[in-house]
Amino acid sequence: MSVESWSDRVLLAELENDPGFSDDAAALIEQCEANAEFSALLNFAEVTFLNSSNISALLKLRKIIKSKNDRRLLLCGLSRQVWGVFLVTGLDHMFEVAEDVPSGLAMMQMS
């Protein structure tokens, strides 16, 4: 995974399947806890499945980012399999989703 600062307030994370997903999520959580200014865009283009610990990490990251009013967490590039997990678990109502990275970055800029 790579986490890069797309701007001074937006982190762009390219996620991958486990075990990398767990490590990536932990790094993102740490960065967002350390800097209250960060919003995050998570690209799921390389993720083909989610397990319960992945979902738990996403919920923790959401809680950290949403604790500040001006911060956003957007997900993009979700495959059909991953989107199916979101639909079955109700996570589709909890997360903002964009089609791809450019769309997600545009949504971040518009807020």
Image: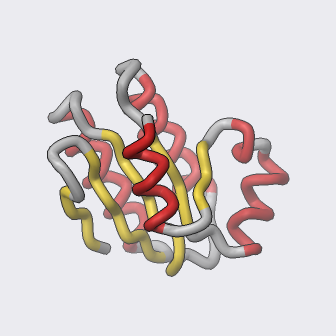
The residue located at (44%, 75%) in the rendering is 16
The residue located at (53%, 55%) in the rendering is 75
**Horizontal arrangement in the rendering, residue 44 relative to residue 71 (left or right):** right
Out of 11 and 84, give the one closest to the viewer: 11
Q: What's the image's color scheme?
A: secondary structure
**Looking at this rendering, what residue extends furthest in the front direction?**
110
Up-down relation of residue 106 to residue 46 (above or below): above
Q: Position of residue 102 (x, y in %)?
A: 44, 66
Out of 111 and 29, give the one closest to the viewer: 111
**Looking at this rendering, what residue extends furthest in the right direction?**
88
Displayed quadrant of residue 61? top left
Q: Where is residue 1 in the image (x, y as percent from the top left)?
A: 31, 74
The residue located at (36%, 24%) in the rendering is 70
Q: How many marks?
A: 0
Q: Where is residue 44 in the image (x, y as percent from the top left)?
A: 52, 69
Q: Where is residue 96 in the image (x, y as percent from the top left)?
A: 60, 44
Up-down relation of residue 74 to residue 61 (above or below): below
Up-down relation of residue 57 to residue 50 (above or below): above
Quadrant in which the C terminus appears: top left
Displayed quadrant of residue 41? bottom left
